[in-house]
Image (cartoon, coloured by chain):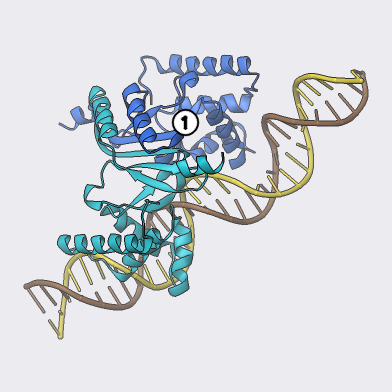
Chain colours: A blue, B cyan, C yellow, D brown
DNA sequence: TCTGGGATGTTATATTGTAACGTTGTTGGC
DNA sequence: GCCAACAACGTTACAATATAACATCCCAGA
């Protein structure tokens, strides 16, 4: 999860941002979509689709896989969340307006995930794609390892 | 798939290399594992586990999912193939001895995949992980877009 | 020869994701 | 206001991907 001082605050900020962007783009930020986005932000780490479904069914017993996946599609398509392909899991995006070229640092120990949007990496990737005469549309970069907290704890 | 002049040759090279490495490391490069590796190299692009299973069942009707997944685990663990997480598919690695930090360019049109081991990207990633006090163990970088051939073809 | 461990066989099931079609609800043009 | 069109959602069914658990086989080394 993205580091934050007050996570309640940070969930609210993310939802308000999504709300504002949807208004501007005339997208329908329905209760269902908002609920799924909230649940993703509430989890401290990447959330699995069927875990989200289970939670959703607590308030909406008739929810089905398609219910969740459709909301996820919407949220991904509009930049509010990312899919972490290596984990088959979903994580909130903290800057949906600059949502391209977000990279992830994922701790194998605590499962925390931090988004890192790094211009140097973006530049290096661009150089390489140009050398290879390749036009990049979408990039998945997931770096697994150990975060500082876990390294300190295990010492 | 990795670009090559003569693909038969390139399959053989890959298998011989795996054979040699297994001998050196005292690993058992069984017929089954060799067969799966060959099938992955024979496909011109990322191969799906259940497609491999279907092919395998043509010569080995009793093969089961576990048969394939266990061979894949061996091949991944020893650097002979990569899993392309975004596609749930598997692709041969053309330099198993320098198997870390391999990146992929994947064409959305022709599905061809090329391995690109780029020191600049590796360096940029390393700089970022150090800045973030993160110790990277494993990196997945999958760049989707359009290859030069497909761009030329569509003009 | 025995035996321990790795490889494989086998059965069952868990997990992840989508197709297809029906229903509801909202919105914009008349 | 009415209604046509379309997006969102409900529902059923199933496809695709992956693993657990336990049995059996086979070979290398004591």
Circle 1 crowding by C-alpha within 10 Å: few under 14, some 14–19, many from 20: many
- How far from the left and from the top, in percent, is residue A13? 48, 14
Q: Is residue A84 above or below residue A80?
A: below
Q: Which residue is mark 1?
A: A82
Marks counted in the figure total 1
Query: Please, which chain is the residue tagged with disc 1 on?
Result: A
Q: Residue at x 51, y 35 (%)?
A: A52
Q: Residue at x 31, y 64 (%)?
A: B12
- How far from the left and from the top, in percent, is residue A34? 58, 24
Q: Residue at x 62, y 18 (%)?
A: A25
C18 sits to left or right of C10: right
- How far from the left and from the top, in percent, is residue A151? 20, 30
Name the secondary structure under disc 1. strand
- How far from the left and from the top, in percent, is residue C18? 59, 46
* Residue B73 or residue C22, whichever sits in front: B73
* Residue B115 or residue A42, whichever sits in front: B115
A128 sits to left or right of B27: right
Q: Is residue B59 above or below residue A53?
A: below
Location of residue A104 by image quarter? top left
* Residue A25 or residue D1, whichever sits in front: A25
* Residue B18 or residue A102, whichever sits in front: B18
Is residue B72 shown to the viewer in this render? yes
Is residue A64 shown to the viewer in this render? no
* Quadrant position of the N terminus of chain A in the picture: top left
A19 sits to left or right of D5: left
* Quadrant position of the C terminus of chain A in the picture: top left
Q: Residue at x 48, y 60 (%)?
A: B51
């Amino acid at each position: 999860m993205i580091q934050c001082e007050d996570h309640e605050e940070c969930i609210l900020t993310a939802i308000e941002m999504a709300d504002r962007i949807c208004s501007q783009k005339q997208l329908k930020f329905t209760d269902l979509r908002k609920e799924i986005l909230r649940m993703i932000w509430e989890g401290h780490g990447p959330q699995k689709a069927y875990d989200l479904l289970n939670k959703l069914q607590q308030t909406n017993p008739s929810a089905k896989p398609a219910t969740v996946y459709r909301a996820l599609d919407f949220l991904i398509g509009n930049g509010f969340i990312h899919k972490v392909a290596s984990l088959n899991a979903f994580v909130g995006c903290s800057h949906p307006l600059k949502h391209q070229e977000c990279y992830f640092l994922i701790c194998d120990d605590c499962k925390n995930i931090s988004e890192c949007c790094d211009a140097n990496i973006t530049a290096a990737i661009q150089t390489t794609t140009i050398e290879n005469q390749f036009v990049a549309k979408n990039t998945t970069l997931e770096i697994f390892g150990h975060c500082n907290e876990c390294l300190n704890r295990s010492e």
